[in-house]
Image: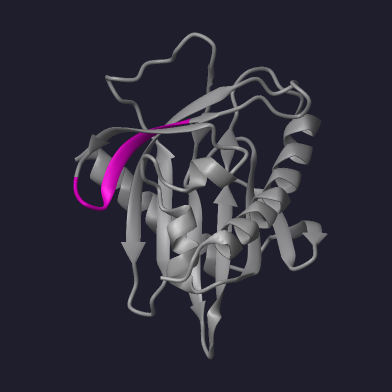
Amino acid sequence: MEYDDKAKFAAERLLSYTKDPSGWKVCKKSNDVVVSWRPSVEYPGNVYKGEALVNGGLLKVWECLKPIPNGLRVKWDSNVKKFELLEQMTEDVSVCRTVTPSAAMGIISPRDFVDVIVVKKYEDGTISSNATNVLHSSCPPQPGFVRGFNHPCGCVCIPVPGEPNKTQVFTVFQTDLGGLLPRSVVESFFPSSMTEFYSNLTKAVKSLKDF
């Protein structure tokens, strides 16, 4: 199936981005957050990688990041306005629509994205959410939104040996925002929004009761 193949490809790509150190250039550092970039091989733009240690156990952090309808992420992530399930293929593979608000003082208008998403769990305890763009018959481009396209992207939560209350979190974004946006706007938006992402994630994790 096309969706399964694309989901598998996205997961493999995402893991390789977190493990391959070559070619990355740091573009923003804030507290414990490091954001790097390098040219994408998927589309004529950049891939951005964020990395930070988040205070909170892995399951607590993952609870904030889980790609599910009515999940916590819509509540704390300022770049996610709506998250809709279009089709559930298996327990771990789904097709979803994400709506983002306007950004950069209105220069970037509201976007929507349709992606296949797969959740992967690895033997060392790592959990990842992996996504890439797909077409879905139930969700053609809609009035009021510019259709954007995510190339292999997502979040990876990695346990820290000897530190049960800390989680290493990688984020990878390589997004064709669509529309006729100046390159300078895009290149300034992602590093800043990713730094804000980690700040908001840390607050969300801290606010969760232990479980």
Query: In this view, which residue lies farthest toward the bottom?
Result: 162
Query: In this view, which residue lies farthest toward the front?
Result: 209
Q: Is residue 41 visible?
A: no
User: Residue 176 falls in which quadrant of the image?
Assistant: top right
> Please, which colouring scheme is shown?
one colour
Front residue (pair 40, 104)? 104
Residue 54 percent coordinates (x, y):
61, 69
User: Residue 168 falls in which quadrant of the image?
Assistant: bottom right
**Left or right relative to 6: residue 34:** right
Q: Where 70 falls versus 135 (above or below)?
A: below
Query: Is residue 104 highlighted in magenta?
Result: no
User: For the stretch drawn in magenta, what is the main secondary structure?
Assistant: strand
Q: Residue at x 74, y 38 (%)?
A: 189
**Left or right relative to 136: residue 196:** right
Query: Is residue 94 highlighted in magenta?
Result: yes
Q: Which residues are magenta?
A: 90-98
Residue 105 percent coordinates (x, y):
78, 25
Q: Residue at x 57, y 43 (%)?
A: 174
Q: Is residue 126 visible?
A: yes
Quadrant assignment for the C terminus: bottom left
Q: Where 25 falls versus 163 (above or below)?
A: above
Quadrant assignment for the N terminus: top left
Residue 53 percent coordinates (x, y):
63, 71
Front residue (pair 43, 113)? 113
Query: Total number of numbered labels?
Result: 0
**Left or right relative to 187: residue 162:** left
Q: Residue at x 71, y 49 (%)?
A: 196
Residue 199 percent coordinates (x, y):
69, 56
